[in-house]
Amino acid sequence: MMRAFAMISVAGLSACVQGTRPMPLAESGPVAVELAGASYIADLQPTEAGPVLVMTRDGASFGNAEGLEAKRAAEAFCASRGMSVNRAAYGHYVGGGWQFKRGCA
């Protein structure tokens, strides 16, 4: 009986570890991005659900209707690293910036 309990406990612990992978490192800080004469700030941060790229405009905040501009700036940021934004990902407007889940892929 005790042996069965020990085996179940070990199996339970291994189930907790099975799907985990290391969280990617954050950028060293916000990164300036220039696109078509405008300045943006890209901030790529790790989260439990994966990296999140937050784009803000240098100076004035983005508006809720400016997601396409933010996504183009995010694409420029990712392209500078040899990657691209997940084209199927929707941006989320939060506090004057646009968040893109999964960051650059």
Image (spheres, rainbow, N blue to C red):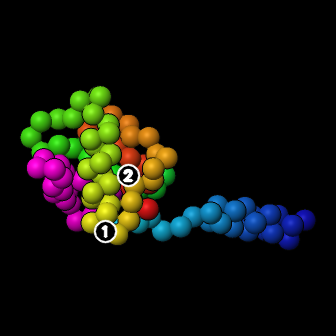
Mark identifier at residue 47: none
x and y percent of residue 75 in the render?
Answer: 32, 54
Left or right of 84, for residue 70: left
Left or right of 84, for residue 76: left
Q: Is mark 2 on a helix, strand or loop?
A: strand
- 27, above or below 73, in the image: below
Q: Is residue 88 magenta?
A: no
- 42, above or below 93, in the image: below
Q: In the depicted view, which residue is nearer to us: 88 or 45?
A: 88
x and y percent of residue 55 in the render?
Answer: 26, 47
Quarter of the image that includes the C terminus: bottom left
Q: In the depicted view, which residue is nearer to us: 28 or 81?
A: 81
Give the residue displayed 32% in from the left and 61% down from the top: 78
> In this rendering, does residue 54 appear at all?
no
> Could you tell me what secondary structure mostly forms the magenta stretch?
strand
Please name the amino acid that badge 1 sits on.
Arg
x and y percent of residue 58 in the render?
Answer: 12, 45
x and y percent of residue 80 in the render?
Answer: 27, 66
Give the residues drawn in magenta, as a range. Answer: 26-46
Q: What element carries label 1?
A: loop
> In this rendering, does residue 65 appear at all?
yes
Q: Which mark is first along the chain, 1 or 2?
A: 2
Left or right of 36, for residue 79: right
Give the spatial CA distance, label 2 vs label 1.
15 Å
Give the residue displayed 32% in from the left and 39% down from the top: 68
Mark identifier at residue 81: 1
Q: Does the magenta stretch include residue 31?
A: yes
How packed is label 1: few (under 14 Cα within 10 Å), some, or many (20 or more)? few
Mark identifier at residue 52: 2
Give the residue displayed 39% in from the left and 40% down from the top: 91
**Viewer-nearest of discs 2 and 1:** 1
Q: Which residue lies furthest to the right in this view?
A: 1
